[in-house]
Structures are given as structure tokens and as C-alpha cells.
């Protein structure tokens, strides 16, 4: 987990007194890329667990899609009260008029998620209070349901915390080319084990011009503005031979839709994979 210093802001918000969090480890967010213009990625969400920043994707007014590894520790579910979600704003830190912040009422982790293998690394977060759609700066992402050919450029959007002043913390985006399973696994055979429901994208060598970092876990990668995958592994942060590995959402559309009507609660400490899967 990333470690952060906390600064209490004096401006009120929908949560009643926000906590402005200044990362102590700036390099744990996206490396490189270009500043995303306003409205380019209206489904991008910041997911904060305690004082750690991750990402998610708004899929409708009530739900956020993210990686199961964001809301588990050692394969055990965390308490949903620990999680805060923010959307509608290119800034990850500070008080801005377009931002909407929410707590959670439920979190739904894939029953067969395995934190050791990375299989089924996907979770749905239900907001305690929905976003009001239509919204000027928040939209639900469309899930891409087709095969993505090798060589296709996907687009990732995530926050970068630059080293030193000025402390501008704006959303950035960059392209990640889809690479073959063989190319993805050959540089680091013990680390990059690619499963059938995952897609590998990024640059190998030389050092990539742009790449994801640990703080971007749970973020989305897109093709033609449709969500292709959720970041689960491969946090290069500018290092060579460490492409990003995404859980491909086309394999989970039925599961995702089933979570929208679930009413059961995931008790904190629930171990995954579950011995007895839950029925939505």
C-alpha cells in the first residue's frame, strides 16, 4: 500500500469536510503521457482506501468498476466504510466545483478472485448515494464486447503526481499497444502469467515513453472510448519489460450486470476465492 501525508482542507464538500491527501511517493502514479482535456474521460474515478489512492471506472449512476485487489488485503475483503470514491474532476487532490464524492453501501468482489494468480481480478462498488445523471462531468462507461487484435493502440487515463512544484495533479492519458501473450511473458516469465480473460498492453524495451504505476490499479483502458479492461498488474512506472496486464471486461459483462441487483453484504475479512460462491 502507498503511504500518504494528510492535510485537512477547510472547504466543505458533500462528505462534510474533505481530507486533502498529498502523496509522499509521487512516482507511484502514471509515468509520462499528456494532460487529458476536460470531458475526455468522464467515467474515470478516484478510489481512495484509507490514505491510498487507486482508480475505478463509473459504469452507471450507482456503481464503480475496479480491481478486486483494490478492495482486498491478502485475499480478504476490506470494510466498505474504508473506501471513498470521487468522480467528475480532472484533479485528484483539492476542492473543485465539478467533483462528486461518495461513500459505499456495498462492495462485490468476484467470488473466484485469487490474489496470488490474479484471476478474476474485478469488483463492483455500490455507492451509498447515486450520482445524478445526466451530469455535466460524469458519465457511465460503455463496455467493449469485441476481441481486441494485437497491435491495437488502447488508451489509458490516470493521474500523475509530479515530483516537485508546481503540485499539479491532473488526469493524463497515453496509448498502450496490445502485445502478444508470448511477448508479454518472455521478459519476466515468473511475473507476467497471462490468463485467457486478461489482455496485455504496453511497451517492453527501451524504457516506455509512458506507463502505469501502482496508484493506477483499478483504472480503465479504452478503445474508441469503450472500456476494454481494468488494470490489475504490471506497474512499470517507466521500467523496461513490465507491460500492463488488464482484466478484460468482455468476459465479465454478465457478472457485472448481476451485481447491480445484489442485496447481500460482503463481510469484512471474507476470504477469496470463496468456498461457496454467492448467488446474486
Image (cartoon, rainbow, N blue to C red):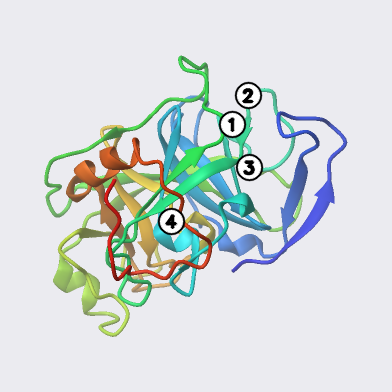
Element class at badge 3:
loop
x then y, percent, for residue 172: 50, 43
Label 4, on which residue? 210
Q: Position of residue 17 (x, y in %)?
A: 81, 36
Instruction: Estimate the spatial distance between the alpha carbons at disc 4 and disc 1, rounded to whole Å.
Output: 22 Å
Discs 4, 1 touching: Cβ within 8 Å: no
Task: Say which residue appears at 33% left-offset and 42% top-offset.
Answer: 259
Q: Which residue was labeled with disc 3? A: 92
The percent coordinates of residue 199 (x first, y second) are 23, 58
Q: Which residue is mark 1?
A: 89
CB-based contact (under 8 Å), mark 3 and mark 2: no
Q: Please tell me which residue is depicted at 52% across the width and 16% down the height of the picture.
A: 136
Identity of the residue drawn at 54% across and 58% down: 215
Q: Is residue 233 above or below residue 169?
A: below
Horizontal placement of 154 versus 215: left or right?
left
Quarter location, residue 192: bottom left
The answer to whether the residue labelled 4 contacts the one labelled 3, judged by CB atoms less than 8 Å apart, is no
Q: Are marks 2 and 1 in contact (CB under 8 Å)?
A: yes
Secondary structure type for disc 1: loop
- Residue wearing tag 2: 98
In this rendering, which labeled residue sits more in front, label 4 or label 3? 3
52 or 189, which is in the foreground? 52
Amino acid at each position: 500500500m502507498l503511504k500518504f501525508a494528510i492535510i485537512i482542507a477547510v472547504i466543505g464538500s458533500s462528505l462534510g469536510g474533505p481530507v486533502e491527501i498529498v502523496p509522499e511517493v509521487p512516482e507511484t502514479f502514471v509515468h509520462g503521457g499528456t494532460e487529458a482535456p476536460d470531458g475526455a474521460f468522464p467515467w474515470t474515478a478516484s478510489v481512495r482506501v484509507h490514505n491510498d489512492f487507486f482508480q475505478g471506472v463509473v459504469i452507471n449512476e450507482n456503481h464503480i468498476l475496479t480491481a478486486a485487489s483494490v478492495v482486498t488485503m491478502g485475499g480478504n475483503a476490506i470494510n466498505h466504510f474504508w473506501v471513498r470514491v470521487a468522480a467528475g474532476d480532472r484533479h485528484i487532490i483539492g476542492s473543485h466545483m465539478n467533483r462528486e464524492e461518495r461513500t459505499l453501501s456495498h462492495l462485490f468482489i468476484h467470488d473466484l478472485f485469487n490474489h496470488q494468480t490474479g484471476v478474476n481480478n474485478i469488483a463492483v462498488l455500490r455507492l451509498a448515494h447515486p450520482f445524478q445523471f445526466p451530469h455535466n462531468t460524469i458519465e457511465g462507461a460503455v463496455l467493449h464486447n469485441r476481441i481486441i487484435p494485437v497491435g491495437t493502440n488502447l488508451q489509458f487515463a490516470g493521474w500523475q503526481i509530479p515530483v516537485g512544484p508546481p503540485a499539479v495533479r491532473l488526469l493524463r492519458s497515453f496509448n498502450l499497444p496490445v502485445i502478444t501473450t508470448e511477448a508479454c511473458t518472455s521478459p519476466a516469465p515468473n511475473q507476467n502469467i497471462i490468463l485467457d480473460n486478461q489482455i496485455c498492453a504496453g511497451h517492453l524495451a527501451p524504457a516506455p515513453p509512458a506507463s502505469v504505476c501502482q496508484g493506477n490499479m483499478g483504472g480503465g483502458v479504452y478503445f474508441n472510448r469503450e472500456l476494454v479492461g481494468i488494470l490489475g498488474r504490471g506497474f512499470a512506472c517507466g521500467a523496461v519489460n513490465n507491460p500492463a496486464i488488464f482484466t478484460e471486461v468482455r468476459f465479465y459483462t454478465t457478472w457485472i450486470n448481476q451485481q447491480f441487483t445484489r442485496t447481500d453484504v460482503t463481510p469484512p475479512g471474507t476470504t477469496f476465492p470463496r468456498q461457496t460462491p454467492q448467488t446474486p
